[in-house]
């Protein structure tokens, strides 16, 4: 069994602290593969909040003092509130890998609500991503190293985790698929880096081993826009910046953002901005 954990001020005693809105008290990880089972039972709960992320395998939780287990699979998180009874078990044969963090503060409930986690939510379907593990590992490291301003950095890391959770909870499509996340992220980066060039969407999808319809459908679900609309938006946004901050003429700016025909560039710009490039420049200089 692999264990790595760390505690604020090296204290294993749970605590409630209302001096700041959000305070990370401890963080750690377990990876069960040789030990047969690892049970946890806290009949009176803890004074702080606890968030557990099942990164692989599965875990068995017994909520509300029930003898029937709720199986929580990889890609899900469990949130315990202060003084809520805790009972859960990991089994070695299921190769459970879990990360956990304890936190307290005077505004935790409102912060959780801000990121889409209401009081009724207990098991969160967050999907699996290496970003979750990276943040947990960074929190563990910060607690172990205790460098300057580490409590503030711990708070920022936890907020980053909550933001990622909120994005997943509010995402329109329900596919918890790391392959999909990776491909859509790769596509966005490719379009950002190459928006000035002629990009053939069908050719791009084929080279990445995807059907064109599947790629366009999932890209739109992921970004709320089609691939071509995304590319045009990058061009127009960067054209705005060049019109506001440089002395390049309209033809030069059109060429810089991917339009060799200045008339076509002006038409596309006006369609999206409601004004021509020259009029936009005049208004922005007022």
Image: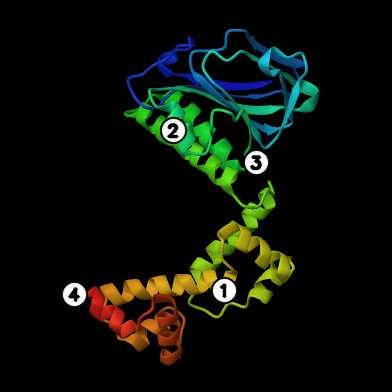
The residues bearing labels 3 and 2 have C-alpha atoms spaced at a distance of: 23 Å
* Closer to us: 181 or 111: 111
The residues bearing labels 4 and 3 have C-alpha atoms spaced at a distance of: 49 Å
* Label 2 crowd bin: few (<14), some (14–19), many (20+), radius 10 Å: some
Question: In this figure, which residue is indicated by the disc labeled 4?
Answer: 286
Label whose residue precedes the other's in the sequence (4 or 3): 3
* Label 4 crowd bin: few (<14), some (14–19), many (20+), radius 10 Å: few
Label whose residue precedes the other's in the sequence (3 or 2): 2
Label whose residue precedes the other's in the sequence (4 or 2): 2
Q: Which mark is residue 128?
A: 3
Question: In this figure, which residue is indicated by the disc labeled 2?
Answer: 111
Element under label 2? Answer: helix
Location of the C terminus by quadrant is bottom left
The residues bearing labels 4 and 2 have C-alpha atoms spaced at a distance of: 41 Å
Q: Quadrant of residue 34?
A: top right
Q: In the image, residue 88 lies at what x, y percent?
A: 69, 17
Q: Quadrant of residue 238?
A: bottom left
Q: Are marks 4 and 2 in contact (CB under 8 Å)?
A: no
Element under label 1? Answer: helix
Whether residue 132 is situated above or below residue 207 in the rendered picture: above
Observer-side mark, 3 or 2, equals: 2
Q: In the image, residue 28 lies at what x, y percent?
A: 55, 24
Q: In the image, residue 51 lies at what x, y percent?
A: 56, 26
Question: In this figure, which residue is indicated by the disc labeled 1?
Answer: 228
């Amino acid at each position: 069994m692999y264990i790595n954990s760390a505690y604020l001020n090296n204290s294993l005693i749970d605590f409630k602290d209302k001096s700041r809105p959000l305070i990370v008290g401890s963080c750690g990880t377990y990876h069960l593969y040789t030990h047969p089972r690892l049970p946890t039972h806290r009949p009176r709960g803890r004074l702080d909040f606890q968030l557990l992320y099942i990164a692989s395998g599965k875990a068995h939780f017994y909520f509300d003092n029930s003898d029937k287990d709720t199986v929580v699979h990889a890609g899900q998180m469990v949130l315990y509130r202060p003084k809520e009874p805790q009972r859960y078990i990991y089994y070695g044969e299921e190769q459970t890998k879990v990360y956990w963090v304890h936190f307290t503060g005077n505004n935790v409930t409102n912060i959780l609500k801000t990121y889409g986690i209401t009081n009724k939510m207990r098991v969160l379907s967050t999907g699996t991503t290496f970003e979750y593990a990276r943040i947990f590992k960074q929190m563990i490291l910060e607690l172990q190293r205790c460098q300057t301003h580490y409590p503030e950095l711990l708070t920022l890391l936890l907020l980053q985790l909550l933001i990622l959770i909120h994005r997943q909870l509010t995402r329109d499509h329900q596919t918890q698929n790391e392959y999909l996340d990776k491909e859509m992220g790769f596509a966005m980066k490719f379009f950002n880096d190459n928006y000035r060039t002629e990009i053939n969407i069908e050719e791009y999808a084929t080279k990445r081993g995807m059907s064109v319809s599947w790629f366009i459908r999932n890209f739109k679900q992921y970004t709320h826009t089609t691939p071509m609309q995304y590319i045009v938006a990058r061009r127009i946004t960067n054209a705005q910046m060049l019109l506001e901050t440089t002395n390049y003429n309209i033809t030069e700016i059109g060429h810089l953002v991917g339009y060799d025909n200045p008339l076509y560039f002006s038409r596309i710009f006006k369609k999206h901005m409601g004004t021509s490039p020259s009029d936009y420049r005049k208004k922005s200089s007022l």
